[in-house]
Image (spheres, rainbow, N blue to C red):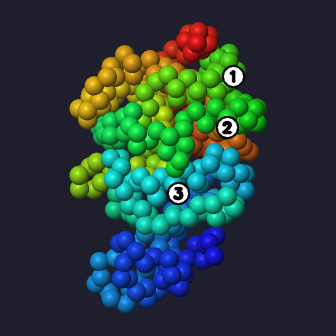
Amino acid sequence: MVPKQPEDLTREWFSEHLTEGVFAGADFASVEIQAVGSDVGFLGDICRVIPSYTEANGPWPKSLIAKFPTVRQANLETGRHLLAYEREALFYRHAANGCPADPPQHYFSIESDTPGDYLILIEDLEGGRFVKQVDGLAFEDAIEAMAALARMHAHYWQSADIKNKPWLYDFSQWSQIYPASIESGWPLFERDFGYLILDHLKPVFPPGNAAAAQLFNYLSTARPVTLIHGDARMENLCFDPVSGKARYYDWQLVSSGPAAYDVMYFIASGLEPEQILARGDELIQHYHKALLASGVTDYGLTDLKQDMELTTCLLFGFTSMVGNIMADPGEAERTVVEATFPRYQAMMELFNVVDIVPELHRRLG
């Protein structure tokens, strides 16, 4: 039986399934399940598992995190549509242990085509320092987060390890996913959050939405590719309490694609609007220096900025996805969007999308 909810993670289930790797030789005496903060997420729900062992001082993990599909039906459908559950389980199984972005250690995973048959068991990062998205990120933390992305991007840069691998989805697959999400989500975003859209940006949303599929295909085929997190934002990372290094988790949108997308989305979701406009370019330069230091020699700062111009235009389509996920918002959802959407618009202004969008078809050929 595949566990569908935390209560299904019993001592008997652990004893049957966790017999290898870090759990080799473990004899489970009991299993305690704890909620983790607001344990209902947008696409995945988590709990903390605290096992006890008959050998109390053994070398096995003292706690771990279990992640299930979300219990919110609308968000569950979105997660399945995005292939989010398969993406994450496959990433943890094939690439997490050894990835330079230092994700949680992978212990166990299940994925299948049957709704609800998804589970990952991973390292508990409880000791890390976490930052809430609504609070924004200190610039020094942003530099460290950029450095972690640069190390990962450089490690997989144009590598056979991420090209044509059956376990890793390609960035171009979003070209098949976004149009339907935009069609349903853009009217919802306009209805629920249209009051946040700056007047001078309103005219470029429809053509920006329309260009999404072409952008994904171009960035997948005409630009350098690497392993990208796909959802690189402050609430998907923490900082090691000893080294201070960033550790990324929540790999539900991982793919092979352009490094510039991770860089763009991290800045657009993490820094406050005034920081983006005043210091966004500085942070991009920090990332690029870290990329060069990690071994990439054929990708100039101009190349990065030009790719970021294009990936910034994907924020139009992402806004539509927000419309689907956050439809009929409560106070919590409205708080998140009101905190983050102005950052997206600041990123659009940093790269002057008002002038770029009308030129997209020419630039993309």
| Three-letter code for the amino acid on which mark 3 is drawn | Ala
Query: Is 360 above or below relative to 4?
Result: above
Mark 3 vs mark 1, CA separation in Å? 31 Å
Which SS class for mark 2? Answer: helix
Q: Earlier in the sequence, mark 3 or mark 1?
A: 3
The residue indicated by pointer 1 is 210
Please indicate whether residue 20 sits to the left or right of residue 109 in the image.
left
Position in image of residue 357 (x %, y %): 60, 14
Within 10 Å of disc 3 (Cα), the crowding (few <14, some 14-19, many 20+) is many
Q: Does residue 336 appear in the picture of this structure?
A: yes
- Which numbered disc, 2 or 1, marks the residue that appears first in the sequence? 2
**Residue 319, located in which quarter of the rendered image?**
top right
Q: Give, as a three-letter code, the residue at label 2.
A: Ile
Q: Distance from label 2 to label 1 (Cα)?
A: 13 Å
* Residue for point 38% across, 82% down: 26
Q: Which residue is mark 3?
A: 89
